[in-house]
Image: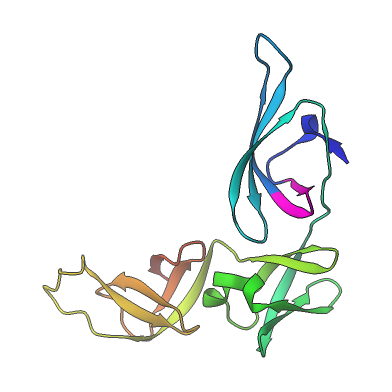
Amino acid sequence: MATTNDLKNGMTLNLEGQLWNVVEFQHVKPGKGGAFVRTTLKNILTGKVVDKTFNAGVKVDTANVDKRAMTYLYKEGEDYVFMDAETYDQIYVPEATVGDAANYMLENTEAVVALHDLTPLYVELPASVELVVKHTDPGLQGDRSTGGTKPAELETGATISVPLFVNTGDKLKVDTRDGRYISRAN
């Protein structure tokens, strides 16, 4: 248990049986009346963002979320198998929990897995990863109808937009948050 005065960005709260991350908070002390805390909360499982106001000093239930460095090993059925880097324990993370991160994960990719009571909540990849282009059509000189980009299929099976000069077999740096092409990898 903590009070609303202890809130920090990134803190996880257990409100009405659901887990919420504090995205932003602001202590407000109006000239008249009691102080309060205005927060922006994001539901960990659904991603829904809501604004919630608490009276100052009210107790809120904090959730213990354990973020562990893990290595993605392989996919088994509908689950992804991760290994804890310290204990070598393996955990199975459902496909729905991994979400879009699966588009940028190869075997032996390092990731951070957030756990609450040994239940995986989400998977966090590094900001960018390096992946090889499995297939892309050759870019034609003068083809600017698409803004100078073309689709490229990566070795993970994901398709992203890349500049016309990218060829099959090139190694690219890709942003894992939105799937944007960043640059060619050295």
Q: Position of residue 29 (x, y in %)?
A: 68, 17
Which residue is farthest top? Answer: 31
Q: Is residue 8 visible?
A: yes
17 or 127, nearer to the observer: 17
Residue 115 as seen in the image, left or right of residue 172: right
Q: Is residue 126 above or below residue 140?
A: above
Q: Is residue 186 visible?
A: no
Magenta stretch bounds: 11-20
Is residue 12 on the magenta stretch?
A: yes
Residue at image point 84% right, 68% down: 118
Query: Where on the picture, by quarter, is residue 36?
Result: top right
| Image quadrant occupied by the N terminus | top right
Does residue 173 appear left or right of residue 151 in this picture? right
Q: Position of residue 183 (x, y in %)?
A: 39, 66
Q: Residue at x 48, y 77 (%)?
A: 131
Above or below — where is 12 with respect to 157?
above
The C terminus lies in quadrant: bottom left
The structure residue drawn at horizontal position 69% and vertical position 49%, both measured from the top left corner, is 21
Q: Position of residue 65 (x, y in %)?
A: 79, 56
